[in-house]
Amino acid sequence: MPDEMTSKGHFLKRILGITLSGRSSFSDASMASFSSGYPKMSETEGIADAKDDLDTLHRFTSGRWLWNERQQLACRYVKFDFPALLQLAASAIGSGSCTRVLKISEGQYNKVFQLTMDDGREIVAKLPNPNAGRPHFTTASEVATMDFLRNVLDLPVPRVYAWSSRASENPLGAEYILMEKQAGVILTDVWDSIKGKQKVRLLDQVVDIERCLAATKFSKFGSLYYKDDLPGKSDYTSLLYIDAVGNEVQSEIFDIGPTNHRSFFDFGRGELDIDRGPWSTITEVVTAVAQREIAVAKAGLRYPLMPEGLFYGPRQYQPSLTKKLSALGNYLEVAPHVLPENKATHASTLWHGDLHSQNIFVDPEDPSRIVGIIDWQSASACPLFMQAERPAFLDYNGPLPEDLGKVPLPPNFDAMDPDEQRKAKALHRAQTLHNLYLVRCLQVNQAVFQAIQGQNALRHQISVVPGLVLMDYEPLLHSLLRDVGKEWACIVGVGGDASSPKMPFPLQFSEEEIRQQDHDAELWAQGVELMDAFVEDTGCFKHWDGRVSNVDYDKSRRELDEGVRRFLDREARSDEERKEWLKALPFVD
């Protein structure tokens, strides 16, 4: 019988870095280099440029993919009428004409251009890629969300000048948002140079912004829209929410409609006929997530990017429809009873799910002062416990502190060489800011603190993991379900005799099922170790979807090919196994 705690240790190590969207800590750590901030990417002077130069405005030109490149480029190609964009932009702010175009960002989901007018004024145009989400809904919700954040919550969010969520109804032929150019400089440019006290003041502002978001609680779960943009708008009621000071507010302008959360659209999910809300209760939310993953499994979808482990190969864990449906079906039997115990974390709140240093703008004269936060696309009103986590700009590579006390330097610090001391100080600063963030949350934003600190709890994990079955997390889900069985009396309470639970545990696993689950858990952990070793051996992975810079592509491609050859030489015991591995590895087109 496999060591259950060893296997579960692998699971828990992985789950700590995973959000509702199913993105792991590996991916989050590398997102900053491909963000939606404002670095200069490419430039078009005037309108008389060569056709090939103009075509770069439609295509993704900021990198290459090591696998699935054709599909990745196709889902980031946006055809639009370039002269119409210039005319719309000039008209939006009352300028005569647009004289300069700067392609400033190519993130995962959008094209972003900085447009300079003949009077010197500058605005930003944002055009969603085909992979950004459902047509109309994603753009309509982003605009309404920015309006609500800026004008209702008074948060530092760019002003929208003009927009269209109906590509077929505007002269551009694409969805677009024209907004003010965010003042200030991106935090990335100054973070390493600002002093510790300035970082603390900046962190306090982030905590205050999150306090405002967490305190604004909605009556439904989904995404925020202008009521007039919702299909069947007459079926919707006025938006009810609790504002940051505890007052119940009714809005005739906004309402909660279907979710735009990426977990309901990415990796083929967008093509499925599934329930996307809005939902009135948290039980409806977690049920819809599980039902979504059931539909994913039945459709045969597989996670196409960086896998958590090398499964499917010879002698490895073999995900199957039966295993996925069994785990999800069993979860639905207990779902209403195993929600996180702290009900304050159940609240429907808006949240910024990617608060890295290129989405935060600060005053160049006082870089401790935040002047803007961008990229609210797909922000959704979701349960707080599914969203709250340490802001991405505080991420670092290294262990978490053991407690929230003062973080010490290593006891052997004085004996270290200068390079080791430099690294130790950098880790010390990062861990100190991590602790300070949590302490500030504990002081002024307890619901967020409780949501983050509760991530290790069984009831948090059992409520989040069902959303990760596309990524083959069903062995962890079954392991957690068995843990729920052990804790069932504590979860539902005991009956009159004080010796048995108020209601019987609805799941029963045979000895054979338990043996199979343990075996799957052992193989799952083995696949994770195999994946970790593969990544370390190749050295080519820069990003969670296989993206690398144009400059690095040839070198990384060689490293990946060589790494695959070494892997096959190590793991394949026969020509037949070699063929099986080539079929199983996602990195081989």
Image: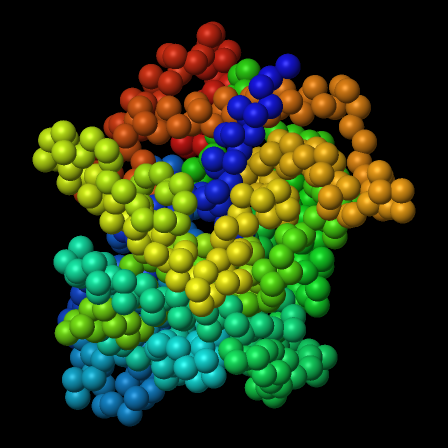
Residue for point 59% across, 60% down: 345
Residue for point 70% across, 48% down: 338
Q: Within the image, what quadrant is residue 558 found in?
A: top left
Relative to 231, residue 377 above or below: above
Residue 51: x, y in percent? Answer: 23, 63
Residue for point 53% across, 16% down: 314
Residue 439: x, y in percent? Answer: 40, 58
Q: Is residue 442 left or right of residue 182?
A: right
Q: Within the image, what quadrant is residue 572 found in?
A: top left
Using the rendered image of the protein, determine whether residue 43 is visible from the camera's viewpoint: yes
Taking the view exactly as shown, the residue that stands out farthest to the right is 496
Q: Is residue 269 left or right of residue 130?
A: right
In front of the other: 474 or 303: 474
Relative to 286, residue 296 above or below: above
Q: Is residue 416 left or right of residue 151?
A: left
Taking the view exactly as shown, the residue that stands out farthest to the top is 574
Residue for point 66% across, 67% down: 278
Quadrant where the N terminus sits is top right
Quadrant where the C terminus sits is top left
In front of the other: 536 or 212: 212
Q: How is the image coloured?
A: rainbow
Q: Within the image, what quadrant is residue 570 found in?
A: top left
Relative to 154, residue 407 above or below: above
Q: Is residue 413 left or right of residue 257?
A: left
Taking the view exactly as shown, the residue that stands out farthest to the left is 418
In front of the other: 193 or 130: 193
Using the rendered image of the protein, determine whether residue 377 is visible from the camera's viewpoint: no
Residue 186: x, y in percent? Answer: 24, 65
